[in-house]
Image: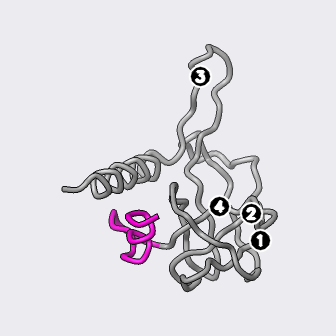
Amino acid sequence: MSWSERSAGALLAAAMVMTVTGCTADSSDGGEGEASCAFEVTYQGRTYRDVANVEFTVTDKLGTATQPPCDDTGGDEETKEKETKEAAYGVKGLPPETAIAVGDTPDDAVFVVSYSGSTLPPEIQKLIDNP
């Protein structure tokens, strides 16, 4: 197994841990817990999750993506947070059904991918393996 395959596997494993754990509270300072939720957005009926360490180029603005509120309590009580809206941008070389970038501006946009399970789409894996 090459170094890039091991690195990509480690990144994917870390991303999956974040997805599985979803939201946790950090109260290591002895004070109030701090919310920690996985970064997910929805756009055109698809859910996208962030993927780190991918080189990408933002293209045109596509519309608006929605980030659901973080429910870090794990209970059924109603969350006080509201969903937020952010601009959705295209990513050069990838269809919006696979990946988009979201953020207030193209410069601060985060790369997000629509996939299920534990395997990234091949075109995303290729970007990770060949930066």
- Tell me where the magenta segment starts and ends, as one range: 115-131
N-term-proximal mark, 1 vs 3? 3
Instruction: Please state which of residues 7 and 78 is positioned toward the viewer in this rendering.
Output: 7
Left or right, 83 with reference to 92 = right
Q: Which residue is mark 4?
A: 110
Q: Which mark is residue 87?
A: 1
The reply to whether callout 2 and callout 1 are in contact (CB within 8 Å) is: yes
Amino acid bearing label 2: Gly
Residue 39 image-quadrant placement = bottom right
The reply to whether callout 1 and callout 3 are in contact (CB within 8 Å) is: no
Amino acid bearing label 4: Val
The reply to whether callout 2 and callout 4 are in contact (CB within 8 Å) is: yes
Left or right, 4 with reference to 66 = left
Q: Position of residue 95 (x, y in %)?
A: 55, 86
Q: Which mark is residue 103?
A: 2
The reply to whether callout 3 and callout 2 are in contact (CB within 8 Å) is: no
Residue 69 image-quadrant placement = bottom right
Left or right, 123 with reference to 78 = left
Of tags 3 and 2, which is closer to the observer? Answer: 2
Q: Position of residue 88 (x, y in %)?
A: 71, 74
Classify mark 4: residues with Cα within 10 Å, few (<14), some (14-19) or many (20+). Answer: many
Cα separation between marks 4 and 1:
11 Å
Looking at the rendered structure, the secondary structure element under dot 2 is strand
Amino acid bearing label 3: Ser
Instruction: Please state which of residues 28 and 102 is positioned toward the viewer in this rendering.
Output: 102
Q: Which residue: 35% across, 66% down? A: 117
Q: Which residue is mark 3?
A: 27
Name above or below for residue 17 compared with residue 59. Answer: above
